[in-house]
Image (cartoon, helix red, strand yellow):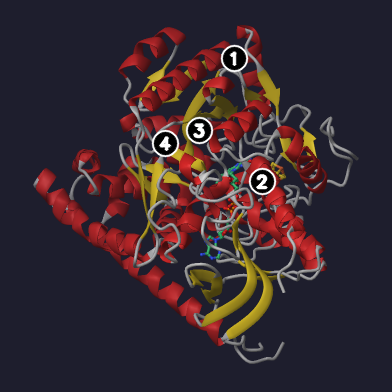
Amino acid sequence: MAERPAVIDCDALVIGSGAGGAVAALELARAGRRPIVLEEGPEVSVADIADASPAENMRRLYRNAGLSPIHGRPTIAFGEGRCVGGTTVVNGGLLWHPPADLLDRWALRSGVDGYRAEDLDAHLRDVTRRLSVITHTERPPANRDSRLLAVGADALGWRRQDARRAVRGCRHSNRCATGCPTGAKQSMALTYLPQARRRGARVDAGTRVVRIAHDGRTVTAVHAVGPDGRRTTYRPNVVFLAAGALGTPALLQRSGIHARRAGRHTAIHVNLRVNARFADPVAARDGTIFTTQLHEFADLGILVMPANLTPGTLAASLAGHAPRVLERLLADIDHVGTYTVQVRVSGSVRVTALPAGGLLLRHHLRASDRELLRFGLRQAARVLFAAGAVELYAPERRVLRSVEEAEAFVPRADPRRWDLVSVHAMASCPMGLPERGGLCDGYGRPYGLRGLHLCDASVLPGATGVSPQGTIMAFAHEITDRYLALPRLP
Amino acid sequence: MSGAPDLGALARDRADRRALARTTRALRASGLARVWAVRYPPLREPEAAALAGGHVAGSLAALAPPYRAAFGVLLRLVPAAFRLVTGRRLEVASPEVLAAGAGRLERLPVLGTVVRTTGTLACYGALDGVRPAVAARAAGTELPERAWPNDPR
Ligand SMILES: Cc1cc2nc3c(=O)[nH]c(=O)nc-3n(C[C@H](O)[C@H](O)[C@H](O)COP(=O)(O)OP(=O)(O)OC[C@H]3O[C@@H](n4cnc5c(N)ncnc54)[C@H](O)[C@@H]3O)c2cc1C
Ligand code: SF4
């Protein structure tokens, strides 16, 4: 194998190959800028994913094997991808457009315009086409967990929404969160990145950026460690930073760029998992992540939806229960559906890059967030019992057998004792006027520095409430387009 | 591509293997496998126990160095903490004592998080650590189920 030179001069460099970085890579490649994409994680093919067990894929596709702790009460496990394609390789493939009223609020609050629904519409159409986004129709008998949720919602007269997903020929094989073994999910690794490569982009997998060097006004170099452990210095004309909502502020801190503010107030959605046992078979392993989502409380930032169910995820979620509960539910797995209550919390996460590597994450969930979590659990209980559930395996090792039991339990429940996870982080380096708390301008440029554009989840002005990939990609398209429209300096 | 070995990849593999060997040793020293066999019935079969151990050690080895080191130290403290909370030695404790002791350990700050996290990982690894027996069917080539109304196609 040819040895890589210690110094590489290039035109455009993209850091991170997920939802944001892949967009920048394709747009730059289409403009003939031959970008180099540096990705810390490995390149893993569909065949490799298919041959491995879900647990093996968890270890190699996720950062920290999916175990990044956000400290606080309770400790929240954060999941994000670390591979070519980023988190899009392990996500659910749901692709929502950002709500127009949310974009309007962001524009007013941040003072940056040009990111409203009408501005992003063309980008979202492009994303929809490139990712083959479809609305799932039912394919009975699969996805009965989703149909039961719909039954419950309809019985209560509550709003629900069909899932919009980036999939082609989904086999309903129920493994979305550990990488799609069939190649149906249209992750960045199967769409934007191959297209960018065909137009001259290069992807260096296993290459971790350790620092962005600058002279206080302009980026001068990017230092990275390659798969062989050797350091390489890149000297690009422009850098697009898309290391994710946690990775981007960490890299800014390590590079002395807005080090005190980057990552200070990162927004997250928090997920609670509830297992429901039904009298009739659900066969939830036969299906995709979900086809229906409960939208009745979307204005409050609360969504309820089924999740992928496997023996491992069921056992892991019941690990705190008595041995006989675990044994019984595993034996009865075909009667179980697993549901996620997703809550947009207002308390934020602080990201701190540790000198020895890794991140220290701390959350500050508020009393109002705990109230929202309790409210979410209560509504999930109502809809699932309306759907015919006979038992709910709630937090704090509680087994609830009726709405009345849920109503009695919820006011006394303490989310500080719950097992919570998060898979959506955003707004750690928000776009906005500096006097309104913004860290970067409408071009994604951190204030006071030339040659650097942020273009991932970190730049969103706040939490989306819905799954964020569509919003992230639309912002990344707009940021790259704006950059490409700038006059080129000699 | 030349036939020469990729020295970089070899070095990386070696570093990964070292990390895995360390977390495997720390996990063994913790004695937690005995606790799992009592707490989680599906892990009683040797094959499942081996998958569980492999997943826990592999996941801890994938952590950032400061967290990996902290887990290593805390895992080695488990037997002493167990003795403190139960008055018995973990290696020879009866199933009842193991179950009660694990419950008490789980309520301790910091060490409790380690015990709970490794237990959750063990359950996941034991049950989802099996490679698929049948190859996954490739994605379908039929037309998308229903295009989104905005879709320009
Ligand atoms: C289980 C799960 C399910 C999800 N489901 C959905 C869903 O259905 N729909 C949806 O909209 N969203 C979903 N999400 C979230 C969504 O996928 C992410 O919000 C989105 O991918 C973030 O895009 P990004 O570009 O900011 O970062 P990422 O996609 O995470 O990409 C960042 C990349 O940068 C790399 N990187 C980081 N640091 C460095 C460095 N120093 N040097 C080089 N490379 C680096 C990382 O390895 C990573 O590959 C889900 C997430 C998870 C974990
Ligand atoms: S359900 Fe299966 S085929 Fe469909 S996207 Fe998920 S993993 Fe891929």
- Which of A278 and A133 lies nearest the eye of the viewer? A133
- Counting residues from the N terminus, which is met first, the one under dot 4 or under dot 1? 1
Judging by the rendered image, the residue that carries numbered circle 1 is A387
Q: CB under 8 Å between callouts 4 and 1?
A: no
Q: Which residue is mark 2?
A: A475
Find the distance from the CA under tag 4 to the CA under tag 2.
Answer: 29 Å
- Give the alpha-carbon distance from disc 4 to disc 1, as whole Å: 24 Å
Same-chain check, marks 3 and 2:
yes
**Residue kind at label 3, given as amino acid type:** Ala
Give the mark nearer the N terminus: 1 vs 2.
1
**Which residue, given by chain and number where applicable, does mark 3 sit on?**
A331
Residue at 58% across, 22% down = A298
Q: Residues within 10 Å of mark 1 (few under 14, many from 20)?
A: many
- Amino acid at pointer 1: Ala
Q: Is residue A38 visible?
A: yes
Kindly indicate whether the residues beneath marks 4 and 3 are on one polypeptide chain: yes
Q: Are marks 4 and 3 in contact (CB under 8 Å)?
A: no
Q: Tell me what residue is drawn at x 42 percent, y 64 percent.
A: A256
Query: Which residue is tagged 4?
Result: A420
